[in-house]
């Protein structure tokens, strides 16, 4: 599985028929990628963090405030809305794109609108494909473009996923954005793994949420020790 992942990194592409997994195969998939991620995370932390700290380019971590308890938010909401934004649109359908945009809108304007108003607008955006007819020729052309530029989309969303996590730090300076691949290297790798699982397997979007949850879970448990 990991060998196939590395081959995919060299030539990202959208397979027409995603692979199916048995229950045993799913456990193997999640276990291998979980171990691979934490192995990369440990090695990258040992390699990059001392250098960034020595250069005074390691920002301090911060804890975001929310009406929702942080641990519950990280366990339940974060894997769902981050996967909806960064992984769901990797396979083009008008529904996937609408849901992704609705979730992005919700995230961006979370502290601007009243919650009920925010939910109403997000639901409206998500339902646009249901009540607006889009010509089949437009959908077909968009799907072709998605296929042609998929490698850019795949790597672009993984980098964007990493950049989003840069804002988990405080006291950010311009210099931090120049070295962001080293600060959020783990999240970029995570984005690449989740993106691969999302497009390569049937029900890959669900699998990516589960793996995202499993990666977050140990970090949350350690914070409560």
Image (cartoon, rainbow, N blue to C red):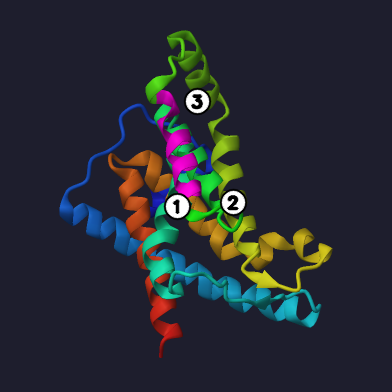
**Who comes first in sequence, dot 3 or dot 2?**
2
Region rendered in magenta:
116-129
| Up/down of 166 relative to 100, above or below | below
Q: How far apart are marks 2 and 1 (CA)?
A: 14 Å
Residue on which disc 1 sits:
81
Of the numbered discs in the image, which one, if any, rests on residue 147?
A: 3
Q: Distance between the residues labelled 1 and 3?
A: 24 Å
Coordinates of residue 205 in the picture (x, y in percent) = 35, 45
Q: Main secondary structure of the magenta part?
A: helix
Relative placement, left or right, of 175 versus 48 is right
Query: Which mark lies nearer to you, 3 or 2?
Result: 2
Query: Residue 207 or 67: which is nearer the viewer?
Result: 67
| Up/down of 196 relative to 98, above or below | below
* Local SS, label 1: helix
Query: Residue 215 or 14: which is nearer the viewer?
Result: 215
- Whether residue 198 appears in this view of the structure is yes
């Amino acid at each position: 599985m990991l060998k196939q992942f590395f081959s995919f990194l060299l030539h990202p592409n959208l397979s027409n028929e995603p692979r199916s997994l048995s229950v045993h195969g799913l456990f193997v998939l999640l276990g291998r990628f979980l171990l691979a991620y934490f192995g990369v995370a440990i090695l990258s932390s040992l390699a990059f963090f001392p250098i960034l700290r020595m250069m005074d380019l390691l920002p301090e971590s911060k804890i975001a405030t929310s009406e929702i308890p942080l641990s519950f938010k990280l366990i339940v909401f974060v894997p769902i809305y981050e996967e909806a934004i960064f992984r769901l649109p990797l396979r083009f359908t008008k529904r996937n794109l609408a849901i992704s945009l609705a979730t992005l809108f919700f995230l961006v304007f979370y502290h601007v609108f009243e919650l009920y108003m925010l939910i109403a607008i997000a639901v409206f955006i998500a339902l646009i494909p249901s009540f607006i007819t889009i010509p089949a020729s437009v959908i077909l052309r968009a799907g072709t473009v998605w296929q042609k530029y998929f490698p850019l989309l795949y790597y672009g969303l993984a980098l964007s996923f990493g950049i989003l996590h840069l804002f988990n730090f405080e006291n950010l300076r311009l210099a931090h954005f120049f070295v962001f691949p080293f600060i959020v290297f783990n999240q970029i790798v995570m984005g690449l793994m989740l993106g691969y699982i999302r497009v390569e397997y049937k029900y890959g979007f669900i699998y990516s949420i589960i793996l995202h949850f499993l990666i977050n879970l140990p970090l949350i448990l350690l914070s409560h020790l």
